[in-house]
Amino acid sequence: MRPSLRRRTWRAAGYALGGGLLAFLALPVVALFVTGSPTDWLAGLRHPITAPALLLSVVTTAISLGVLVVFGTPLAWWLGRSEARVARVVETVVQLPIVVPPAVAGLALLLAFGRRGLLGPLLEGVGIDIEFSTIAVVLAQVFVAAPFYIQAATAAFAGIDENLLVVARTLGARPATVLFRVALPLARRGLIAGGALAWARALGEFGATLMFAGNLSGRTQTLPLAVYTALESDLRAAQALAVILVVIALAIIIFLRPRRGLHRR
Amino acid sequence: MKRLAIAALIGFGVFGSGATARAEDPKELTVFAAASLRESFEDLAEAFEAKSPGVKVRVNLAGSQELRTQIENGAQADVFASADQKHMATLLKAKLVTAPRVFARNTPVIIVPKGNPAKVGSFEQLPKAKKLVIGVPEVPIGTYTLQILDKAGADFKQKVLANVVSRELNVRQVMAKVSLGEADAGIVYRTDAIAAKDKVEIIEIPAKLNVIAEYPVAVLTKAPQAAAARAFVDLLLSSEGQKRLAAAGFVAP
């Protein structure tokens, strides 16, 4: 009798604790939806600020994700497969953007790539003007989202059984074949999950963008910046924009979430 | 038993310190002030504390619109100082404040980074700034900027707006981009420009084109420290208060 009672108590406590956190996380999102009406959202969709911001957000986050996959995958491969100490150091450094406040990240980007930044004279020499441009939006997104993709990809590559790669090689597969036919499919789940998280983070990026890229409709004003701008004048428009943002982010996470069954390969 | 003793000790400590703190607790005056009042209100708070022993001034600085929203949602405050009349009028209509009075005026100026890289010599040469940063029309400084450009003529306005690279959400962000040298010029309040005078140069806007921002102050209807709040407003309007505000770049009402 006693052990079963104790187990039930533990389970009840677990439900209460987990459920409490779940309610805390869900309530603000629910509030965002239920305190507005579909007419509000329609009005928000038609607000002149919305369409350019939506388009810019979709385009820049897609480019950012592309940049991350192309540059981040080789880095994650090395981090996941290397036993060198320096790899562990790099792994830590790569996580830095998570703990740096976004506004600080924006300032740091400005001090590095801005007109008076470290690389400023160099960039000016070749005629590239980064600050206040759409390129700056992409750089800010890549900076803050990179850790999410690299971390997941690193774990995915680290989890590949070395023997499978060795077997493929001994069977005569060329390096490219091993990579594309064996390694990447095996790591696919982690890569997709990391990509989805990174994309969602890029979509929500605000502080670094505002600092580094500024706020100009059609050029640097992404959805989060549009929400903040609308907040100054029209709370309902801001809320409608926020709902759009949440729906897109949810869609990304739901569609790209790894299926449960795949966990047990 | 040991755990119980520790718990008792902690409990005693908490209640004990709570009781002593309450006995000596000074009265706390909460002042909600627009972000552009930072330097002058910190100075005025000190002056007020020196005059009124036992009163501690806590200044909460944020955008006027943000402070207004906080007050509307029941924030505990005694004094509200706004950077424009609109937000004060809304609160007055809702009977959340009583008898607002203008205590200071501020005028927009053009700022350029130290050294003036784009060689903007006067208001008329503003189109020479190829990277111009202004406020969004939704915030007061953005509204004022557009009013000034309207007065300067449609052609001039068009030339200037074509060079806008960012519409910032508050004055401090305009300041940041110009003082870092990333923008060629910006339009901010004189008080902000004076606060950063080691990083930026000021270019005057001709008086006939310029607009004047009025700063109203009021005691909240439900002020917990109403007497101290009235005394603080009196200090703002006194010659000493006006002198301190003038040092920050404000003009007397």
Image: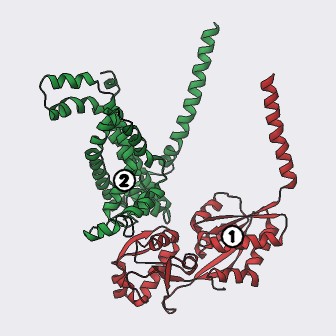
In this orientation, does residue A187 appear? yes
Q: Residue at x 20, y 33 (%)?
A: A179
Q: At label 2, which amino acid type do we have?
A: Gln
Shown in green, the chain is A
In this structure image, what is the colour of chain B? red
Q: At label 1, which amino acid type do we have?
A: Glu
Residue under label 1, please give it.
B42
Q: Position of residue A97 (x, y in %)?
A: 43, 49
Q: Which mark is residue A141?
A: 2
Q: Residue at x 47, y 75 (%)?
A: B142
Mark 1: give few (<14), some (14-19) or many (20+) Cα within 10 Å. some
Q: Position of residue A85 (x, y in %)?
A: 39, 36
Which quadrant is home to the N terminus of chain B?
A: top right
Mark 2: give few (<14), some (14-19) or many (20+) Cα within 10 Å. many
- Which chain letter goes with mark 1? B
Q: Position of residue B158 (x, y in %)?
A: 34, 82
